[in-house]
């Protein structure tokens, strides 16, 4: 059995990206740039981001037996990710259709494809892979029942990091396993519903009340907020100021960096301070995986 700092269980997509002067209104057509195809998916992004930083990383995912699937596997291997857990076949590779405006903001529509075929049985069959992980990270671009199986069957002592994106109602046992639950402002409001308070500190305390052992709320250019249920401590983590070019994948880079630093024993505030620097570096370049920095590049920021 091989040991990993981080096992990412999640999606692998081909990102089809078009730059636009502005995103279209309903019923409107706008012209955009030439189509660019990049390896992506929240799971694939997290795995590449962690490996580039120096983490021993493995990916458990499913791709199609097609050109997009081969592109994704090649990107993972080039970054140093162990792809032994990537299953091939069952449906076409997932695709994300992304429009990026001049400010760097993006809108994304995802066709899950093979990601929707990653099942609880696949998780159970990968028991040896899970057994070697210090931290297991998941997202919601794969079936919720599969994520729940990860939370329930991860080995004792393995920390579970969940980014519920795209947001969906979470079972109590999944929430209780999260350490941390990582959400942006939109995801926090979705999870909390009508109980969402006026600001991030209120959201963090309300999220902790739902059962997670810790919570991290990403705040874009304003950094992040961390809340530790063990100590009831809530802290703001500022981000360095950068000129944003493309925010695609920045949240995935943040979560990967956070998970890796937790795997080596850092407390959640220290890990988040490193992660906001990684996220800031990622937005200064176009694309998702191609934008992710090395540890040396983060140090220079």
Image (cartoon, grey):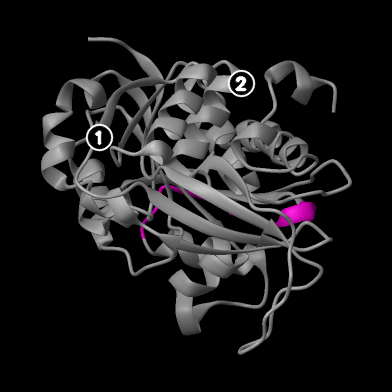
Q: Nearer the viewer, mark 2 or mark 1?
A: 1
Which label number is shown at residue 88?
1
| Magenta-span inclusion, residue 30 | no
* Residue nearer the viewer, 80 or 178: 80
* Residue nearer the viewer, 253 or 86: 86
Does residue 218 appear in this view? Answer: no
- Is 164 placed left or right of 119 in the picture? right
Residue plotted at (46% across, 58% down): 165
* Residue nearer the viewer, 100 or 254: 100
Label 1: element kind:
strand
Q: Would you name the residue on which mark 2 appears?
A: 53
Of mark 2 and mark 1, the one earlier in the sequence is 2
Residue plotted at (65% across, 50% down): 248
In the rendered view of the protein, which quadrant contains the C terminus?
Answer: top right
**Relative image position of residue 290 (x, y in whole percent):** 65, 33
* Residue nearer the viewer, 139 or 41: 41
Magenta span of residues: 211-222
């Amino acid at each position: 059995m091989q040991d990993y700092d981080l096992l990412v269980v999640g999606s692998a997509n081909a990102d089809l990206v078009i730059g636009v002067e502005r995103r279209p209104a309903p019923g409107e057509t706008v012209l955009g740039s030439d189509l660019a195809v990049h390896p992506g998916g929240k799971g694939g992004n997290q795995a590449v981001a962690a490996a580039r930083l120096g983490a021993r990383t493995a990916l458990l995912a499913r791709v199609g037996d097609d050109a997009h699937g081969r592109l994704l596997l090649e990107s993972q291997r080039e970054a140093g990710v162990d792809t032994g857990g990537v299953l091939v076949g069952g449906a076409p590779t997932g695709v994300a259709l992304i429009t990026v405006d001049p400010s760097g903001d993006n809108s994304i529509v995802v066709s899950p494809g093979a990601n929707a075929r990653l099942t609880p049985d696949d998780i159970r069959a990968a028991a040896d892979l899970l057994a070697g992980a210090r931290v297991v990270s998941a997202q919601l671009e794969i079936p919720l029942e599969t994520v729940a199986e990860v939370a329930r069957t991860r080995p004792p002592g393995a920390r579970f990091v969940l980014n519920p994106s795209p947001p969906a109602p979470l079972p109590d046992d999944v929430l209780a396993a999260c350490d941390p639950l990582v959400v942006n402002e939109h995801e926090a409001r979705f999870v909390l519903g009508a109980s969402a308070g006026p600001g991030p500190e209120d959201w963090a305390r309300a999220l902790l009340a739902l059962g997670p052992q810790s919570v991290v709320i990403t705040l874009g250019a304003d950094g992040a907020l961390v809340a530790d249920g063990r100590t009831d401590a809530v802290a703001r983590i500022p981000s360095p100021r950068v000129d944003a070019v493309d925010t695609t994948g920045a949240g995935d880079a943040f979560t990967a960096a956070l998970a890796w630093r937790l795997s080596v024993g850092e407390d959640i505030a220290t890990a988040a301070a490193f992660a906001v620097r990684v996220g800031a570096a990622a937005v200064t370049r176009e694309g998702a995986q191609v934008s992710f920095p090395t540890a040396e590049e983060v140090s220079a920021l």
